[in-house]
Image: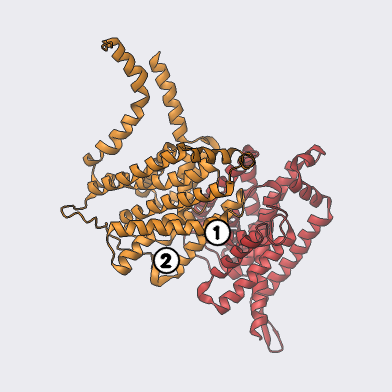
Amino acid sequence: MKTASPKSIRQLWQGQLVPFVPYIAITVIFIILPPLLPSYLQSIMAKILIFSIFAMSLDLLMGYTGLISLGHAAYFGMGGYTIGILMTRYGINSFWIGAPCGILMATLVAAVFGIIALRVSGIYFLLVTFALGQLLFSVAVKWYSVSGGEFGLGGILRPALGIPWFSWNATSFYYFVFLAFAICFFLLYRLVKSPFGHALQGIREGEVRMRVLGYNVWLYKYVTFIVAGAFAGTAGVFFAYHNGIMVPSHLGVITSGLVMLMVILGGLGTLYGPIIGVAVIIIMEFYAGIFAPERWPLILGVTFVVAIMCARAGIGVYLSVFWKRASLIWKQ
Amino acid sequence: MDVFVLNMLNGVSFGFILFLLASGFSLIFGVMGILNLSHGALYMVGAYVGWTIAVKYGLNFLFAALMGGLAAGLISLAMERGFFSHLYKQLNEQVLLTFGFIYILTNISMWVWGPIFKAPFTAPFLSGSFNFMDWSYPKARVATILIGLILAIGLWWLQDKTRVGAIVRAGMDDKEMTMALGVNLGLVSTALFFVGSFIAGFAGVIGANLLGVNLGLGMDVLLLALAVVIIGGVGSIQGALLGSMVIGIIDAFGKALFPELAMFTIYLVMIIILLVRPSGLLGRRV
């Protein structure tokens, strides 16, 4: 066995470690940096992670399977509303009861809506998911005794974890969310790299071909729809704890459109893309909230147009291409 | 007045507003493949422009309606020339683009006209109601039905009996073949886009007497137009007419019989139609 000479360490650095620099940077930003930040920035970072779970779940539908859903917030809001209803109407504060219930409700709604929406394909799918999302929205507005009507369901507290010495602050909540994000990212990563995930991409590229090859395309789509709904519900659960209030627009097209923009902006068909899209939009939203809260929808609309006209592959993809080129130059 | 007839008339007059809205939406979708999600926002802009002319400046109502239509038409023309034509054959991107335009149009409308909603308005000679024996019915609603009926017949004639209509139908069935035969389908599509949006803006002013003018209108009427298209089917005037009548009448009776369910009855019908007949009642294809 050869001992590593300084030169080979340098080669190792250049050859092996350089591609990992972005990962190291991400680790530093998301794990080491947060406790050092002021608490409002920790709260924004927690929101970025929560919406990242949400955006990744939509990307599973849009980017990997090619099903464009404009009603994905229905499952997100369903998860959040379940938490809110359990906490404010029944006084159930435990995370270990609330979270499974929230995710289960989102999954059930996705299972029902999936049957209806997957009757049609293409642009009609977008139309139907949009209408179904608005259906839940109108239920939340009308069903005052359960959902609190258009003023929403306020007073959602941080959950009880059942750990005696534990107390919530911005930092501990951030790491709580980070843990959930890491688990979701790992599960989704395994899913898209599995034969199932490759089959989904096959369906996106050529549905007829996959059908001819003997895949039950409908079932694949349906299962994906439910899985995406479950992850969106998970994001909704954490969003309810983070935000403290759920309003009907969290179920409706406003939120669905927002998360869709995040996915498109970041890059379809990658898991890291949506995270970057989420970060860009939430940071923009934060500054727009300070300087021009009235104009935020206009900024959002223009971002939508610019993202589609000019950056169709997504910022995340551009960044990764840029990084690959940069590391090639570095090697030479 | 008989409650049944009253609800029926209310449903039909609302249905004709929906028809004006959905016919353009459906034809644009059928021919160009663009599901214009900002169609409702164009309706809203038309309504605001009409309000400015008819109420703020007190000018002629018909002039206001035409200007509302023109405003919506010109905006759609700018959208088509400036953006959609650069996204040739990328249907998903085009749809997402129109979604962005909802935000832009709604926020600019709020900038120009303020966040407070405008009360329903109509032409001075249409306020008041017709009295016939012991029956009475608002003139504005009768006028809505008449205008809707005239436009429905006109559009049906245009689509089924004229050369332009033949090109439109051919374009829906086989775009490449139509173009190969030397038809300037691009021009026809652009013209159709303008006309469809013009009718939407026009409907905004006509419908202002029923729905008023507010910033949520863009999304509300878009949902109704979607329901009409899902129920009636895409790409035909007859389908749009049937769908809007179904929605209008269900809405009128729903509001009278189960007011707490509001939009719910419409969704229910829509879901049933989707499960039974995904291409809509008179749809061309899915």
Q: In this view of the protein, which residue sits in the foreground, B19 or A28?
A: A28
Q: In this view of the protein, which residue sits in the foreground, B146 or B240?
A: B240
Relative to A166, say whether B216 is above or below. Answer: below
Q: Chain B is drawn in which colour?
A: red
Horizontal arrangement in the rendering, residue A203 relative to residue A174 (left or right): right
The CA distance from mark 2 to mark 1 is 18 Å
Q: For mark 1, what is the residue?
A: A131
**Residue B132 spot, x, y in % from top left:** 72, 85
* Tag nearer the camera, 2 or 1: 1
Q: In this view of the protein, which residue sits in the foreground, A26 or B135?
A: A26
**Who's the residue at 46% across and 49% down the image?**
A227
Q: For mark 2, what is the residue?
A: A150
Q: In what quadrant of the picture does the C terminus of chain A appear? A: top left
Q: Outermost residue toward the left? A: A165
Classify mark 1: helix, strand or loop.
Answer: helix
Q: In this view of the protein, which residue sits in the foreground, B97 or A206?
A: A206
**Who's the residue at 72% across and 46% down the image?**
B189
Q: The orange chain is which one?
A: A
Q: Mark 2 lies on which chain?
A: A
**Residue B221 spot, x, y in % from top left:** 58, 61
| Residue type marked 1 | Ala
| Residue type marked 2 | Glu
Q: Judge the density around disc 1: few (<14), some (14-19), many (≥20) Cα neighbours within 10 Å.
A: many
